[in-house]
Image (cartoon, rainbow, N blue to C red):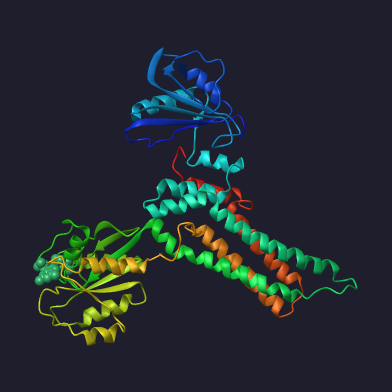
Amino acid sequence: MRGDTIAAIATSPSGVGGIGIVRISGEHAEEICRRLFRPSREVTCYESHRLYHGHIVDIERDMIIDEGLVALMRAPHSYTGEDVLEISCHGNPLILKSVLDLALKAGARPAEPGEFTKRAFLNNRIDLAQAEAVADLVSAGTERGLQQALQALRGGLSAEIRSFRVSLADVLAAIETHIDFSEEDIELPSLRQYIGRLEEAAAAMAETAATYDKAIFYRDGVTAVIIGRPNVGKSSLLNCLAGRRRAIVAVEPGTTRDFIEAEVLIGDIRVRFVDTAGIRDSDHPVEAEGVLYARERADDADLVLVVIDGSGEFTREDSEIIEAYRAKNMLVVVNKDDLTRRLSLEDLERVDPGSKPVFVSAKENRGMEELRERIGQLYDTSGIGDSDVMLTNLRHKEAVEVAAACVERAVRNLKEGASPELPALEISEALRHLALITGEEAGEDILDIIFSRFCVGK
Ligand SMILES: Nc1nc2c(ncn2[C@@H]2O[C@H](COP(=O)(O)OP(=O)(O)OP(=O)(O)O)[C@@H](O)[C@H]2O)c(=O)[nH]1
Ligand SMILES: [Mg+2]
């Protein structure tokens, strides 16, 4: 890695901003600084972590590119652990591109996505879980998502994983002693005494893994697909929830054919509502295509809102739609509650036992607060504190689950009085999977996948 100096625009590369930053990391950072920066007062030695004012110049063309500030962060006390130069200039994309070009001409090469953070990891500034938290921190779309990412970046997740590893390694050492001395004539304490500790560890890991299912909604938001027969008021409902006219509403059934989305913040969660074509058998190819889309979207949804018309009878089609999505997270929304109700709640109860439908009138914009509340309750995490570790990364969740399963098998081995080699093997395997999270055991292939998801400049 030494000798290879990388450069990238660290601020949004296409966006215009007051200030933009070009970041350079590697052993040529200082040399590049001296080549493209003319300090306003003479500098003999750039002090680490100090800002210098001056001009960025293209010496070949004898041209001033911009006025700005530079800071040199010398290794190892920098983000990457290498010499890092940050050039702050005016945030015009043309200026930023010129400054980057100058850095490249002066000997740097363009950084790959996430390469600065990858170097921080390879130079042991942060572990892999922290590196991934950087990407989450940059992309988080909600306050809660930010808190989680920050917590992971500060090492909260890493500390939890480490504590699992410490307790497992402890037990493993004890079991290995048994293996070592089993040939000799010494009275050894029973291995059963470790069952309790292993059970505790497995339960704690399973609990941590389970946080993923909720945390993921903070990170990625929730997709809620609005589905139902034609004309029940799906598009009207979407417009109410979005607080503006998004979808066309019309008296004739079969109005909506494509799907239309609107994103709304409910509590800490971004909910993407998707309006779809009314479900019915249609001879019209475009409408039929829309119905197919609607079903596909609903199949993939996190939440399905089945809308039925309260002013009409409960129909076989209504019941078929409810049946199709009952296994999913589903809410029944009874619309047109401003009209006389002709819907039989007993019929609804028969198809959806324990049904707690939400009654609304999209026409009069009534019942929306209750609907939002009910959706919020589905993703409620009030029991989880801001400082509790939550897994937001599928890779982490899978590793913790596999580790927990290994430990559970070790427990079974011990209960069955199996020879100590078996539980020892399981525990070693659990330790290996936990180490994948913080990166001690992660190979180049895993690193490539992880860092390719980053943006350039991070
Ligand atoms: N009285 C009353 N009429 C409503 C309500 N919601 C929608 N409507 C009317 O019902 C008709 C259909 O509304 P849409 O929102 O287009 O229904 P849709 O389910 O999207 O229909 P498709 O796109 O055809 O599947 C329109 O005439 C609306 O004005 C309501 O709460 N009360
Ligand atoms: Mg519609």
Residue at 57% across, 66% down: 205
Residue at 58% across, 58% down: 160
376 or 117: nearer the viewer? 376
414 or 42: nearer the viewer? 42
253 or 372: nearer the viewer? 372
Residue at the extreme right: 185
Residue 113, horizontal then vertical, whole percent: 47, 41
Q: Is residue 440 above or below residue 63?
A: below
Residue 213, horizontal then vertical, whole percent: 44, 65
Residue 302: image quadrant is bottom left
Residue 395, horizontal then vertical, whole percent: 52, 58
Q: Is residue 317 above or below residue 369?
A: below
Is residue 46 visible in this depiction of the protein? Answer: yes
Q: Is residue 266 left or right of residue 127?
A: left
Residue at 62% across, 70% down: 200
Is residue 251 visible in this depiction of the protein? Answer: no
Looking at the image, how many numbered discs can be counted on the residues? 0
Residue 12, horizontal then vertical, whole percent: 38, 37
Residue at 90% across, 71% down: 184
Q: Is residue 406 left or right of residue 67?
A: right
239 or 46: nearer the viewer? 46
Q: What is the quadrant of the N terminus in the image?
A: top right
